[in-house]
Image (cartoon, helix red, strand yellow):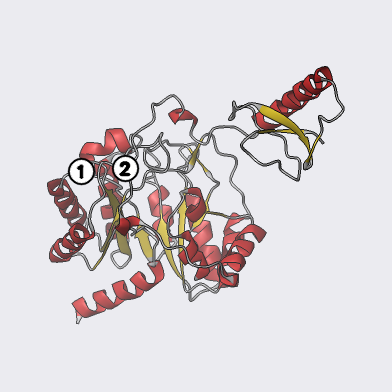
Amino acid sequence: MTSLVPRDEPADMSCQLFDFTRHRAPYRLFAGAKPATAGLSLWCVLILACRAATFAAMVTILDKRPRHPEKAHKPDTPVLKKPDWIRVKVPASSPQFAETRAILRQHGLHTVCEEAGCPNIAECWAGRHATMLIMGDTCTRACAFCNVKTGLPGALDPAEPENVAQAVAKLGLDHIVITSVDRDDLADGGGAHFAATIRAIRALTPSTTIEVLTPDFLRKDGALETVVAAQPDIYNHNLETVPSLYLRIRPGARYFHSVRLLQRVKELSPTTFTKSGIMVGLGETREEVLQLMDDLRSAEVDFLTIGQYLQPTRKHAEVKRFVPPDEFKAYESIAYGKGFLMVSASPLTRSSYHAGDDFARLRAARLAAQA
């Protein structure tokens, strides 16, 4: 097959069609690795080029649906240069990484590691840890910080809870984190699907501890109660940022509704651990972060995570500043002083990063406090 490539790019030996929508450089015609123009008139070359361009456009348009259509019209935001402390050391490829990916693919599962572009994916997957993203890969909301695809999701997969349980068993996980996209299109926001997934894991690997990271279930009466009744070991719901930034960063959510959701978990199940996380570097002040800590403690939240916001694309909210490690340490000390049983605060901290180890420490902290 004939293909077109820009002059400054090598020809693709597999003869993939060139995408004209992304390149405007002068083109030369290739068939495999050899120029296909030898012995042809200019007119023939132009005809072949036009046909290839037309076919290329027909093929590539189908694959160029924007991941974030609601952000396409927005101007590009500035990108700050990352400091040394934010750089991720990617470990060498390992059989464990490949095995983790193969198991997930075998069961047709999504992970937040991939969909949200987590910087810790290489480390976690090499350790055979992955955070399952249930209810599809398409979110009904359009938060300014999130890289998960936005749009109208498909129907729920009734086999997904069992597939998740099978993957957990094959990965040999002692602790699993289950999260999801927002599903405002569902009557219960997906609460029953969360509960079904918890029950499926319990049936297959009863010793695995389960952490859920749920949406806010805004205007979804009974959804929270359904999830709590399934008895996860940790109930996590992230506030994400301080209330003054909600309209810009998390416009589909309500700050005090999220705080109340976490408080309600404790009312329904006092022994269930509760957890919440925020990002810093979005323009919040220190005083606002400390007030947020107080709000979470008023809801009896046990575990707080604080990490640096990293900008997925130029269409997402900009990083206002990179918070240095010593400020994270200060936040950690203050949070412990306010009564949190467990605090994880560092530039690369994410909600499910080292979740299993953190859960073991969280249980130990509760036992020590009760002694």
What amino acid is labelled 2 in the image?
Leu
Q: Picture coordinates of residue 293 (x, y %)?
A: 18, 54
Which of discs 1 and 2 lies nearer the camera? The answer is: 2
Residue labelled with disc 2:
80
Evaluate whether residue 162 shows in this view: no
Q: Distance between the residues labelled 1 and 2?
A: 17 Å
Residue that badge 1 annotates: 284
Q: Can residue 303 be seen in this view?
A: yes
Q: In what element is the residue under mark 2? A: loop
Label 1–label 2 contact, CB within 8 A: no
Say above or below: 213 vs 6.
below
Q: How many labels does the image show?
A: 2
Counting residues from the start of the chain, the first of labels 1 and 2 encountered is: 2
Residue 336, image quadrant: bottom left
Of residues 180 and 37, the one nearer the viewer is: 37
Which residue, as the protein is rendered here, is positioned at the far front?
39
